[in-house]
Amino acid sequence: TKLKYESNLIVDGSHFTPNYVEDGVPFLRVTDLTYENISLDKVKFISYSEHSELSKRCHPKKGDLLLSKNGTIGKTRIVDWEWDFSIFVSLCLIRLKDGFSSNLLSLFFESNLFDTQIKEGSKQSTVTNLHLDKIREFILIKPPIEEQNLIVTRVKESIDPILNLIKLEEKKLSLLREFRQSLISSVVTGKIRITEDML
């Protein structure tokens, strides 16, 4: 099947950079899609009136799938929260019909089948911009919904330990960077003196 036959909506976000405000409606970009929960401390905000205007074309809902389509290609996040938000043009919103799992579609975008299709017909070795027309034409494998759910469960069981290990290593790297910065600061301010014995 093709994605366009399994979707009720495939649309990208705002094609212009809105005016950011201190307090308002979250405005999600590619950089906000992570394995962790989306941190509202890091996202940008737009006014309620601007969100209302953008929602006429693209109004994300719980259960939708967000796909990164510019810069970083193929990152996904299933909307599993209730709060309102708008998205930038670098993100695509996909609203599936009943009978196709959002979780399975998310796995598709991490597969070789996806990589092969985005590179098809491209003269560049790296694709940095994915158009909506291309997204609509993606070819998917569609087993019965029970089998879809089983595939998702099996894959999740396999990759969760790996993702947990990645998170642990990223945390270690972050702590090492903090320690390095603290050490440099201490040397520069004279709190720590480097002697010949230390070299």
Image (cartoon, grey):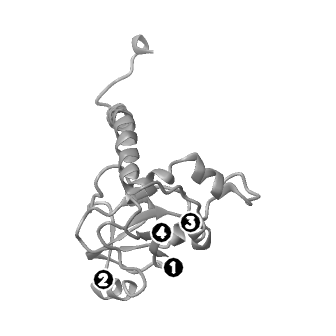
Q: Amino acid at mark 1?
A: His
Residue at 34% over, 44% down: 153
Q: Please provide percent x and percent y for residue 25.
A: 28, 76
State how far apart marks 1 and 3 are (Cα): 26 Å
Task: Say whether residue 13 is left or right of residue 137.
Answer: left
Q: Amino acid at mark 4?
A: Glu
Sequence-wise, the earlier of marks 1 and 3 is 3
State how far apart marks 3 and 4 are (Cα): 7 Å
Q: Secondary structure at mark 1?
A: loop
Decide which of 22, 54 is in the foreground and name it.
Answer: 54
State how far apart marks 1 and 4 are (Cα): 25 Å
Which residue is disc 1 drawn over?
15
Q: Please provide percent x and percent y for residue 108.
A: 50, 53
Which residue is disc 2 drawn over?
47
Q: Are marks 1 and 2 in contact (CB under 8 Å)?
A: no
Which residue is disc 3 drawn over?
2
Residue at 36% over, 52% down: 146
Q: Secondary structure at mark 2?
A: loop
Q: Quadrant of the N terminus?
A: bottom right
State how far apart marks 1 and 2 are (Cα): 16 Å
Q: Residue furthest top?
A: 197
Q: Please provide percent x and percent y for residue 172.
A: 34, 32
Decide which of 95, 170 is in the foreground and name it.
Answer: 95
Q: Are marks 3 and 4 in contact (CB under 8 Å)?
A: yes
One can see residue 181 in this view: no
State how far apart marks 2 and 3 are (Cα): 37 Å
- Packing grade of label 4 (10 A; few <14, some 14-19, many >=20) is some
- Packing grade of label 1 (10 A; few <14, some 14-19, many >=20) is few
Q: Secondary structure at mark 4?
A: helix
Q: Select label 4 or label 2 by which is in front.
A: 4
| Residue 88, image quadrant | bottom left
